């Protein structure tokens, strides 16, 4: 266990070193250099981490105000990497504001219109486009069965998520956060408090506060403390595809069938909700789904994709909040020193910079300051009060 003797104590132990945990560790040390922070990650290469396998996109096209505000604050941070400079090294997140394009038929159009009212009231630069406007702007798009499109004109696109992850880790360590290469395999609990974290090498770590930032494994970490967190690891396959036909101005497109696709350099990457969505499937790409489900939908929407070919594919986990597909942030109601940042259901990478800052404020000051995340509190799950987000991709 790097940097710790057995039975060492810290102020805050963060379980999980993906982008959420790394963002939290960074903000904690930036806001209070006296607070001791242990960032516990079992695999510093992030081989199976959702953060390293993410498609790393960012949007404002949500239907709940809290999600829009989170992404707006994260976007502001991604537009300037100065906050993560280490000496003369300024990370480049390669942010490309290519926009999201949601497509809808007759049934989905009212949802896009209602969402647009919310989005524009919060300053999001989102335009509704009828089929003739879509055809004029995207001549390669089949609009025959569409009624409406919703296009982000600015403030949406994609970026280098792996660079964000590594930059957060590097800066957090420079600020004094301790990286602990280990896995939490058990917890000792007394009443409403976690006393000790037990690690793979036999060492133990006590902490005044424990944060579950374990991504797809949030439920397993919660179970060690005797609490249930409704988060499943849901496999998603990302296909890398080549198309010989130039398709100018291609945004991140979300089809009526639920598939998504966007440019990635000279290629395209995309995916579709799998027919088998059982939790905890092996992280192996579902290659059969391409010809059976994905390609027919692609070729229908973009006829040039008839000649598409798959270059490669990979699989990663969505940390799916099975209750309402939104993040769970803040204290657990059954524990006095357990905090959560889990269940972002596919939009965690884009929201991590702002969520990490807000939760650091809650831990250090007892309140959210930059961003009010009380709508994402665990107590909504306990009360059966779902926060319905209609714009979930995958």
Image: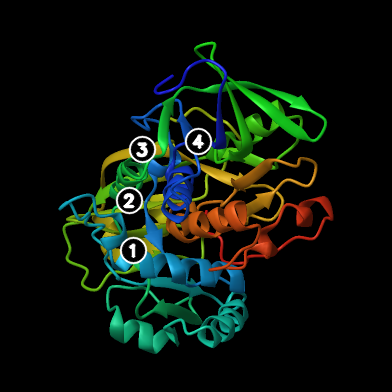
Q: Are marks 4 and 3 in contact (CB under 8 Å)?
A: no
Residue at 39 percent of width and 68 percent of height: 75
Q: Quadrant of residue 358?
A: bottom right
The residue where tag 1 is placed is: 78
Residue at 45 percent of width and 69 percent of height: 73
Q: Are marks 1 and 2 in contact (CB under 8 Å)?
A: yes
> How far across and how far down the image is residue 95, in percent?
27, 63
Q: Are marks 1 and 4 in contact (CB under 8 Å)?
A: no
Distance from label 1 to label 2 (Cα)?
9 Å
Any part of residue 327 in sight:
no
- Of callouts 1 and 4, which one flags the residue occurring earlier in the amino acid sequence? 4
Distance from label 2 to label 4 (Cα)?
16 Å
281 above or below 26?
above
Q: Which mark is residue 164?
A: 2
Residue at 56 percent of width and 60 percent of height: 392
- Of callouts 4 and 3, which one flags the residue occurring earlier in the amino acid sequence? 4
> How far across and how far down the image is residue 357, in percent?
49, 58
Left or right side of 231 for 92: left
Foreground residue among 295 and 196: 196
Distance from label 4 to label 3 (Cα)?
22 Å
Q: Which mark is residue 16?
A: 4
- Of callouts 2 and 3, which one flags the residue occurring earlier in the amino acid sequence? 2
The chosen color scheme is: rainbow
- Of callouts 2 and 4, which one flags the residue occurring earlier in the amino acid sequence? 4
Left or right side of 127 for 162: left
- Of callouts 1 and 2, which one flags the residue occurring earlier in the amino acid sequence? 1
Residue at 70 percent of width and 56 percent of height: 377
Q: Which mark is residue 26?
A: none
- Of callouts 1 and 3, which one flags the residue occurring earlier in the amino acid sequence? 1
> How far across and how far down the image is residue 284, in percent?
42, 30
Q: How many tags in the picture? A: 4
**What element does badge 1 sit on?**
helix
């Amino acid at each position: 266990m790097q940097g710790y003797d057995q039975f060492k104590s810290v102020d805050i132990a963060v379980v999980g070193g993906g982008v959420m945990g790394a963002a939290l560790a960074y903000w904690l040390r930036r806001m209070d250099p006296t607070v001791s922070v242990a960032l516990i990650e079992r695999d510093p290469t992030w081989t199976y981490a959702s953060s390293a396998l993410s498609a790393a996109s960012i949007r404002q096209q949500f239907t709940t105000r809290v999600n829009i505000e989170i992404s707006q604050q994260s976007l502001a941070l991604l537009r300037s990497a100065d906050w993560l400079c280490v000496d003369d090294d300024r990370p480049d997140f390669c942010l490309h504001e290519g926009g999201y394009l949601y497509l809808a038929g007759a049934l989905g159009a009212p949802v896009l219109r209602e969402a647009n009212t919310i989005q524009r009231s919060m300053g999001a630069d989102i335009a509704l486009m009828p089929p003739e406007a879509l055809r004029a702007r995207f001549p390669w798009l089949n609009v025959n069965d569409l009624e409406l499109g919703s296009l982000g004109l600015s403030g949406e696109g994609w970026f280098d998520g792996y660079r964000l992850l590594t930059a957060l880790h590097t800066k957090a360590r420079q600020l004094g956060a301790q990286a602990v290469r280990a896995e939490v395999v058990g917890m000792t609990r007394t009443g409403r408090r976690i006393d000790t974290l037990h690690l793979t090498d036999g060492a133990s770590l006590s902490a005044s506060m424990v944060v579950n930032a374990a991504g797809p494994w949030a439920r397993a970490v919660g179970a060690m403390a005797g609490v249930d967190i409704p988060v499943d690891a849901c496999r998603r396959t990302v296909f890398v595809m080549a198309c010989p036909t130039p398709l100018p101005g291609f945004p991140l497109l979300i089809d009526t069938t639920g598939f998504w696709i966007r440019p990635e350099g000279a290629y395209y990457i995309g995916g579709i909700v799998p027919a088998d969505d059982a939790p905890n499937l092996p992280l192996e790409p579902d290659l059969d789904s391409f010809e059976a489900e994905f390609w027919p939908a692609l070729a229908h929407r973009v006829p040039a994709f008839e000649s598409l070919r798959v270059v490669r594919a990979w699989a990663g986990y969505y940390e799916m909040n099975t209750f309402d597909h939104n993040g769970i942030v803040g204290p657990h109601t059954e524990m006095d020193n357990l905090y959560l940042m889990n269940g972002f259901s596919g939009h965690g990478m884009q929201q991590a910079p702002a969520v990490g800052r807000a939760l650091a404020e809650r831990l250090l000051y007892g309140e959210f300051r930059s961003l009010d995340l009380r709508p994402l509190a665990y107590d909504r799950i306990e009360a059966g009060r779902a926060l319905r987000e209609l714009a979930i991709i995958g």
